[in-house]
């Protein structure tokens, strides 16, 4: 049995009309984060919390990809 994901819109998506939003959902076992764009809800990227944290830190600091 698969668990339904509870999608939340990013607060950085703004108030634009339409579905120009990034959405995030979490699943417990195994721990995973899922990202999608509102305008393409059938396509999602799944990753671990640690991997996403490293990506975001690299974006914030401008670190080169290794």
Image (spheres, helix red, strand yellow):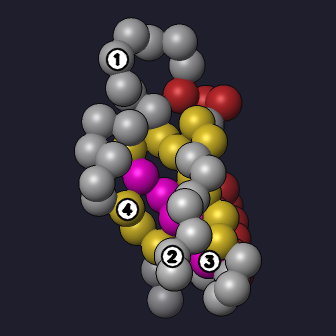
Residue carrying label 4:
44
Query: Label 1 to label 4, Cα distance in Å?
Result: 19 Å
Q: Main secondary structure of the magenta part?
A: strand
The reply to whether discs 1 and 4 touch (Cβ–Cβ < 8 Å) is: no
> Where is mark 1, residue-wise?
18
The residue indicated by pointer 3 is 32
Compare residues 11 and 30 and report the one nearer the observer: 30
Question: In this picture, which residue range is highlighted in magenta?
Answer: 32-36
Q: Which of marks 1 and 2 is nearer the N terminus?
A: 2
Residue in the picture at 36% in, 26% down: 19
Q: Is residue 54 visible?
A: no
Q: Which of 6 and 33 is in front in this view?
A: 6
Label 2, on which residue?
A: 2
Q: What element carries label 2?
A: loop
- The relative height of residue 18 versus residue 10 in the rendered view (above or below) is above
Q: In front of the other: label 4 or label 2?
A: 2
Q: Are circles 4 and 2 on residues that touch, CB within 8 Å? A: no
Q: Is residue 27 visible?
A: yes
x, y percent for residue 64? 50, 75
Few, some or many C-alpha atoms within 10 Å of disc 4 (few <14, some 14-19, many ≥20)?
some
Contact check, label 3 and label 1, Cβ < 8 Å:
no
Q: Does the magenta stretch include residue 34?
A: yes
On the rendered structure, is 5 left or right of 57? left
């Amino acid at each position: 049995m698969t668990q339904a994901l509870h999608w939340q819109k990013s607060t950085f998506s703004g108030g634009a009309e339409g579905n120009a939003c990034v959405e995030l959902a979490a699943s417990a076992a195994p721990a995973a984060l899922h990202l999608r764009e509102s305008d393409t809800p059938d396509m999602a990227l799944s990753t671990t919390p640690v991997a996403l944290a490293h990506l975001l830190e690299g974006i914030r600091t401008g670190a080169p990809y290794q």
